[in-house]
Amino acid sequence: MRPSAARLLNILVPIKRHWCRTVDYAVKIRVNPDQKGIDLSVKHSMNPFDEIAVEEAVRLRERLKDTVKSIKVVTIGPPKASETLRTALAMGADAGIHVEVPESAPAPEPLGVAKALRAVIQREKEGVDLVIMGKQAIDDDAGQTGQILAGLMDWAQATFASKVEVDVGKKQANVTREIDGGLQELQCRLPLIVTTDLRCRRLLMWCTEPRYASLPNIMKAKKKPIEKLTPADLQVDLTPRLETIKVAEPPKRLGGGKVENVDQLIAKLKEAGITAVAP
Amino acid sequence: PHALVFLEHREGVIDNGSLSAVTAAQQLGGQVTGLVVGGPEQVKDVVQKAKKLKGINAVLHSSSSQYTVPVVENVSPLLEKLLASGSPFTHVVSAHSSSAKSLLPRVAAKLDAPAVSDITSLEHDSASNATTFTRPIYAGNAIATVRAPPSIPLKFFTVRSTAFSAAPTEEGSEAEDKALEPVEVADPTVLHIKTDLTKSDRPELGAASRVISGGRALKNAETFNATLEPLADVLGAAIGASRAAVDAGYADNSLQVGQTGKVVAPEMYMAIGISGAIQHLAGMKDSKLIAAINKDPDAPIFQIADVGLVADLYEAVPELVQKLKQTQ
């Protein structure tokens, strides 16, 4: 017998397109001469923590099989952000929602994004039981949206998750979180907002073959539906309430000092007052 | 202005990050009230310490068995009530710690206020009730100046602890304290199962004055520990790691220094076998003295290191340990 609708899991994964996915230090961020932002002409891709979130959702389905009814991905961004949705669809999500904003619009702040996500959740006919999203975007580094969304929905939240086990029948999840100095395990009632941390990614790296690289998956992703919405459809105002006055280069650190050997290194440390401590 | 500072504590001691948050709150130029939330057995000692902190004018405290492990869903209603309309507060301040950064945005959302994360400086204009902050973005490759205008009556922000000194204790001074009724959550949605803190005799990474960090060149967990521990011991340093070392499983996640890990700014930071990706530099480039040992002379870490040694770490580190012991 098929499980009743109430016992199926609908997962939503909000993702963000950002400047560059690479971990290559050679990609430098340049501040625009007008000091209003940064040069965005560099490569764009999915925020790495969001990629972990998509992967985690797909893995949940692998474990929970048909009890995961849907995995939807949602992004808020300019027209090109739909490419990022396609990537997530190629990784295994079923459908996408694109809340489209003009290329020239200022980047919405976390509170605005969370309000849009709330509206998206409220539109979902079958509801949303689990939101999985990255713990932070590595462009603005705010790390707030998941918590804000949990506050707006008055749902449970599990931030900085490294492990998520869902018991669909009991409508609860056990989540292991990375906290300062260690790990914490929480038992959370669904609906729940999970934000993903590093250890999940480590698992991701161990994948023998990244899912999104496979051609058949990319072809399949092209046929999956993407629903287009505007902030007006959702009745949300994405205008930032905080004012960004300036974006500047950080003060340069003058390094480049070299020593020839360990003795000289010790001498330099000593000059700075760094010596051995008593055992 | 009147700031409410969320004071975190562990085993009766106020967290260093919270002490930095007090200093930041003080720079707003008005009243500073501390808030201590905890279990019935925990709060009393912490309140006594909080009252003696320089710059604190008052301490509010609330205790409940629901706060013994401060699960966000249980603590949030207390703050919502305290900050609801009619409250005297203009700012809500905390460390950028894992628990405070889980809590503050949730509370801010309940009050429809945006929040500013991980600030490194601030300036408040009392006349207009506008506060201007700086905060690093793009892994510290850019510094944003952000203004919370008067139209945001209650301004939430978390504080990068390396950017503000810890508020000292001032003997003789004593702020007044007041108990708040806890706001019990009737049917909690989240149950705490367990917390495992990594036990170490070494200084805590975030607060240590000296840090020895290792990278991918350390090969595996065994070599990582065998190479770095003797050096950390002789220098009394905490141990950190690059993301590459954490990803490869050489070091625990809690040791990661960088954009998405810990941000540290010790007196001395020594990077061993770390090439220096921007994401790593974001977590340590404000250290006072940066030393680096790497066999690749072109490693980017040397561009920001004050003292760079191009050498095989497996020779240089043992020699360094031995010679430091001799000069002790």
Image: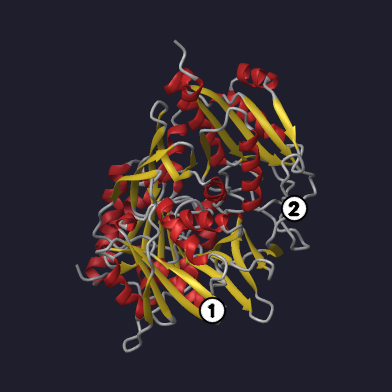
- Measured as percent of width and height from the top left, residue A104 is found at 80, 49
Q: Which residue is mark 2?
A: A106
| Quadrant into which the N terminus of chain B falls | bottom right
Indicate the secondary structure of the residue bearing disc 1: loop
Which amino acid type is marked by label 1?
A: Gln
| Quadrant into which the C terminus of chain B falls | bottom left
> How far apart in space, not on screen, are marks 1 and 2 (Cα)?
30 Å
Position of residue A274 in the picture relative to residue A211 (left or right): left
Disc 1 chain ID? B
Q: Nearer the viewer, residue A190 or A132?
A: A190
In which quadrant of the rendered view does residue A44 lie?
Answer: top right
Residue, far top: A1
Q: Nearer the viewer, residue A162 or B214?
A: A162
Please determine whether, in this image, residue A255 is positioned above or below residue B312.
below
In which quadrant of the rendered view does residue B57 lie?
Answer: bottom left
Q: Which residue is mark 1?
A: B27
Mark 1 on the same chain as mark 2: no
Indicate the secondary structure of the residue bearing disc 2: loop
Which amino acid type is marked by label 2?
A: Pro
- Measured as percent of width and height from the top left, residue B233 is found at 25, 61
